[in-house]
Structures are given as structure tokens and as C-alpha cells.
Image (spheres, grey):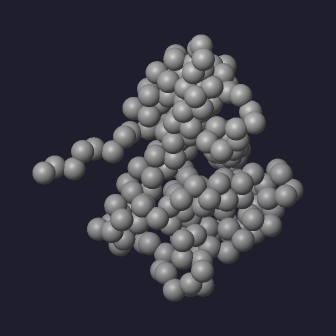
Amino acid sequence: MTTPPQASPDSLLDVARSLAEQSTGPKADAFSRRAVSTAYYAVFHLMLEELESELSKTTWGKWAPEIVRVVDHKKLLALAKAMDTDNKANIKAFKELKRLRLWEQALPGDENADVEMKQFARMVVALQTERENADYNRGTLFDESTAALNITMANDAIVMWRNKLRTRDIARVFLLALFELEGRRDEGQRKTPTGP
């Protein structure tokens, strides 16, 4: 028995668009909620896909498929917030992030993250916040325009990652930090993955 392929970011965006198109009539709120949630998951799956690809080039390569399964939404949200150093509330999180052993590879002594990386991180935060609202906040009505806005933002985030960020050191470190954050409770028990 073969394992079916996982949903790709692009197929998830297509599903979100299909759901948004059905966001009319008495079921508009339900379809819009699903569209908003699915748009966020397109970006989340992109991060998992990219992390697995990055880990496959390191000493952790053979465990990459299992490692990406431990990445959760809280880690991605914390990391994205930490990247937005223009928001003073996130400075402490960023300093904590800089204590990760691999961080100096991308930001040697500089707390100003790449501008486009900040934009990407802000989109991740906004998408995840809306996903949480769509999934859990019954007090807010969702409609086709809300769904369309989130789908556009998710598409923009994916395009920005693929066309502008993917090859940058800061993007590589962002991905590997998702993995290394998992080991922070062990305070140094986990080694940083090494690669070419």
C-alpha cells in the first residue's frame, strides 16, 4: 500500500479558493471559516515542506520526515513574532531567539532582520490569528471578502518565500529555528544540524 502524497501548499490554496467561492447564502460563514483556515494551512505546510528539504541536507536528513511532524503552530507563531523587531513587545522574544546556536549565521550582531523576512513574518502572524478566529471565535461572522483577503495574503506569503526568501541565510535559519526551538527545554541537549 502506497502512502498518498501530502497536500501541497498550492493545492491547499486551491481548496481555500473553492471554499471561498461557496461563501454565499446560509452557509457563507461556514465556508468562509474553512477557507480562512485552509489559507493559513497552505503557508504552514510550505514551512514544513521547506524545513524537511533543509533538514535533508544536514546530518539530520534521514529523520527529516519525522522531525517536521513535531513542528506546531505555536512554534511558528512565536518565531514569526520574534522576527518582527519593529514591534517592541517582540524584542524579548527576538533576544531569546538569538541565543539559539545557529542564529549568528544569519544575523551576526545585528538585531534588524531582513525587511522582507519581517513582512513574511507579519503575514504568518496575521494568517494564524485569523485562522484561530475562524476555528474558535463563534462571535465573529466570516464572509467571502474576509476569505478572499486571507487567501490573497497566503498566496503573497508563499510567493514571497519562494521568489525572494528561500535562498537567503535568514530564511534557512528561520526554518532550522523551528527545529531547534523544539530542543530548548533540554538546554543544549540537541545539537544544531550541520550541512554543506
Q: Is residue 3 visible?
A: yes
Res 173 visible: no
Q: Position of residue 60 (x, y in %)?
A: 36, 71
Quarter of the figure with the C terminus = bottom left
- Residue 177 occupies quadrant: bottom right
Q: Does residue 106 lie above or below 180 as drawn?
A: above
**Which residue lies at the image location 33% right of the left edge and 68% below the top edge?**
63
* Relative depth, front residue between 100 and 42: 42
Give the side of residue 11 with respect to residue 145, left or right: left
Q: Is residue 37 above or below residue 96?
A: above
In this rendering, position of residue 15 left or right of residue 126? left
Residue 44 in percent (x, y) is at 51, 47
Query: Foreground residue, 129 or 125?
Result: 129
Residue displayed at 49% across by 50% down: 47
Viewer-side residue, 55 vs 44: 44
Check the image and name the residue furthest to the right: 88
Q: Say which quarter of the image contains residue 156.
A: top right
| Farthest-out residue, top | 25
Q: How many marks?
A: 0
Rendered location of residue 59, percent (x, y): 35, 72
Give the percent coordinates (x, y) of residue 33: 60, 32
- The residue under the point 60% across, 61% down is 75
Say above or below: 143 vs 169. Answer: above
Furthest-left residue in this view: 1
153 left or right of 180?
right
**Residue at 41% from the left image edge and 50% from the top image edge:** 49
